[in-house]
Amino acid sequence: MDGIVYLEDDKTKKKYVQIDLEKYGDLWPDFLDIIIARNRKNDKKIPFKDVKNMILGGGL
């Protein structure tokens, strides 16, 4: 794919990707959101009502 380069490790396994930000820079925030969401998927969950109370009560 033009503007996308896959880099391989010493065992020729695709390990990294280079993205031409001049060409695909508008997609970068979406990639970053996905990465962050996947990293946080096992984080402790807080019920919405507790978050709402923290915001409205000035606890944040």
Image (tube, grey):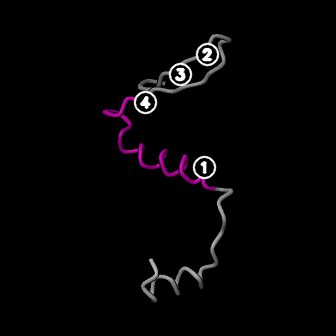
Q: Identify the residue position indicated by label 2 in the image.
A: 9
Residue 26 or 1: which is nearer the viewer? 26
Instruction: Residue at 35% x, 34% y: name it.
Output: 21
Q: Identify the residue position indicated by label 1 in the image.
A: 39
Tell which tag, 3 or 1, sits nearer the viewer: 1
The answer to which of marks 4 and 3 sits earlier in the sequence is: 3
Instruction: Residue at 43% x, 30% y: name it.
Output: 19
Distance from Cα at disc 4 to Cα at disc 3:
9 Å
Q: Is residue 3 magenta?
A: no
Distance from Cα at disc 2 to Cα at disc 1:
23 Å
Residue 59 or 29: which is nearer the viewer? 59
C-beta proximity under 8 Å, tags 4 and 3: no
Q: Amino acid at mark 3?
A: Tyr
Q: Is residue 37 magenta?
A: yes
Rendered location of residue 34, percent (x, y)? 55, 49
Distance from Cα at disc 1 to Cα at disc 4:
21 Å
| Left or right side of 28 for 13 | right
The span picked out in magenta is: 19-40
Whether residue 49 is situated above or below residue 22 in the rendered picture: below
Q: Amino acid at mark 4?
A: Ile
Label 3 environment density (alpha carbons within 10 Å; few <14, some 14–19, many ≥20): few
The numbered disc on residue 19 is: 4
Tell which tag, 2 or 3, sits nearer the viewer: 2
Q: Identify the residue position indicated by label 3 in the image.
A: 6
Q: Residue lying furthest left in this view?
A: 22
Label 1 environment density (alpha carbons within 10 Å; few <14, some 14–19, many ≥20): few
Secondary structure of the residue carrying numbered label 1: helix
